[in-house]
Image (cartoon, rainbow, N blue to C red):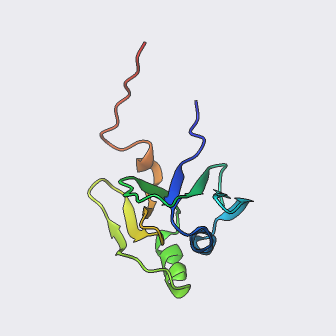
Amino acid sequence: MNLNQVTLPVRDMQQACAFYLTLGFTQIVDTAHYARFACPEGDATFSLSLTTASFENGATIYFEHQALDEWVASLKLKGIVFEQEPTDQRFLWREALLFDPSGNKIKLYWAGDNRLNPPWRVEKRLT
């Protein structure tokens, strides 16, 4: 099993696409109501879906980059505003917080080996 994608609701497709292109993603689908992006590394994708309905998204999408501080600095030079600068977290990640133009919460982070193998890792499966 593999996660296919996450789809975020957006209010303005052009504005949202410009934002994610500025973050460095490659747009692979472009319609008036739907857009899909590929991550610069690996084969992960995510998409945007235009909505006119009111929404409050409680989800957070995470994008990982080994050179987090440099990435954040380069994005700030392009006008991206951060709510939180890169900060070491108690769960052994370093992360920065921002919101896309529709209010979706985004964390840019680097966890290294702790992403899949934190000191408190457990493996539970149904057998």
Q: Nearer the viewer, residue 38 or 67?
A: 38
* 17 with respect to 90 (left or right): right
Residue at screen point 34% across, 37% down: 121
Measured as percent of width and height from the top left, residue 90 is found at 26, 57
Q: Nearer the viewer, residue 91 or 108?
A: 108
The image quarter in which residue 81 lies: bottom left
**On the rendered image, what quadrant is the N terminus found in?**
top right
Q: Nearer the viewer, residue 40 or 89?
A: 40
Q: Nearer the viewer, residue 107 or 35?
A: 35
* 7 with respect to 62 (left or right): right
Is residue 19 depicted above or below 31 in this figure?
below
Measured as percent of width and height from the top left, residue 64 is found at 51, 59
Residue at screen point 62% across, 74% down: 18
* 84 with respect to 4 (left or right): left
Measured as percent of width and height from the top left, residue 95 is found at 39, 65
Residue at screen point 38% across, 28% down: 123
**On the rendered image, what quadrant is the C terminus found in?**
top left
